[in-house]
Amino acid sequence: MDSFALISNQIFNGFSVASIFLLAALGLALSFGLMRVINMAHGEMLMLGGYFAFLTMQIIPGGMGLLVALPVAFIGAAATGGLLQTTLISRLAKRPLDTLLATWGVSLILQQASRDIFGAIGVEVQAPTWLDGGIQITEGMFAGVSLPATRLFIIAVAILVLIGLTLIFRHTRIGLLIRAVNQDRMMAAATGIEVKRADLIIFCLGSGIAGLAGVVLAILGPVTPSVGQSYIVPAFLVVVMGGLGSIAGTTIAALMLGLFSALAQIYVDVSMAQVLLLVFVIVFIQFRPQGVIAQKSRALDV
């Protein structure tokens, strides 16, 4: 494989990695943008999505199983996130440090529970046969470039999620209410908008998207109790670099970090690429501390 084909393959892999980063980070961006809550259990929503996919495909094996697993994982993770928000986070909303510690404790509990139920080694989710193979380019300037179907599927899921979020926020009443709460929480409450209901909806939505991330990760590798922790740090880096609560900024940051990570792995191993990724974010924040897109909000004026 010549160097051009190698770089082209890594750029495609970068888009795939960026899609996973985006799905993992969107929930954090949504909850932080509206409530300024740092949910340390967000990675476990991703883990739950993987286990929901495993259980679904035990009942419905084959190609249909994965398509059914996506809504099952979304609903299951969203319900778990809603339960967490209602019983814990809403009661600690005005105490950020307590929220941080409480969600970290929930994270540990969920990891141990999954370890007791499914084992520490992890479970395998068999990708359907229609995800075998891919597109192989054999002629022209892109000869040697390979586009695996699994990676194309992950990119498609991320694009559909972004389109869905855009439609919800711009063309539905609940999206209008959420934008109102995000812009000025006090004024929204004064006009009769149920801000707590908006908080619950956005938390469920973010957790559900993390569940979808768990499904696409499940077809790449085994689902383990710590799989969420592997992606929570990159997800936080994406949110910080994107602009703390900005969906557009989160998308751009995910693309930047995904491409950077994939291209760095041409020259260094995975561990060193992660170190370089962290250094890149630190340097970027030094020059642009507000992130890619600065989000103006008065969400927590009260």
Image (tube, rainbow, N blue to C red):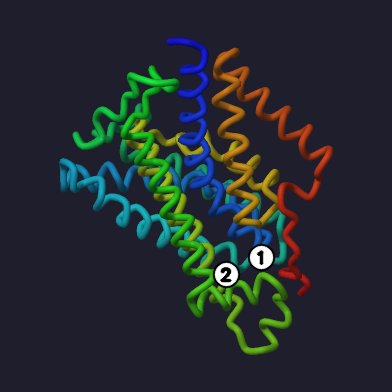
Calculate the distance from the C-alpha at mark 1 to the C-alpha at mark 2: 10 Å
Residue 182 in the figure: left or right of residue 3: right
Q: Percent x, y for residue 253?
A: 63, 43
Residue 82 in the figure: left or right of residue 147: right
Q: Percent x, y for residue 92?
A: 65, 64
The amino acid type found where label 1 is placed reads Ala
The extreme front residue here reads 140
Residue 38 in the figure: left or right of residue 232: right
Q: Percent x, y for residue 182?
A: 66, 70
Residue 13 in the figure: left or right of residue 121: right
The amino acid type found where label 2 is placed reads Asp
The extreme top residue here reads 1
The extreme right residue here reads 287
Mark 2 Cα-neighbour bin, 10 Å: few <14, some 14–19, many ≥20 = many
Q: Earlier in the sequence, mark 1 or mark 2?
A: 1
Quickly name the residue at label 1: 93
Quickly name the residue at label 2: 199
Q: Residue at x 50, y 57 (%)?
A: 206
Position of residue 39 relative to residue 200, above or below, is above
Q: Residue 71 sits in which quadrant?
A: bottom left
Are dots 1 and 2 in contact, CB under 8 Å? yes
Position of residue 110 relative to residue 93, above or below, is above
Disc 1 is placed on an element classified as: loop
Q: Nearer the viewer, mark 1 or mark 2?
A: 2
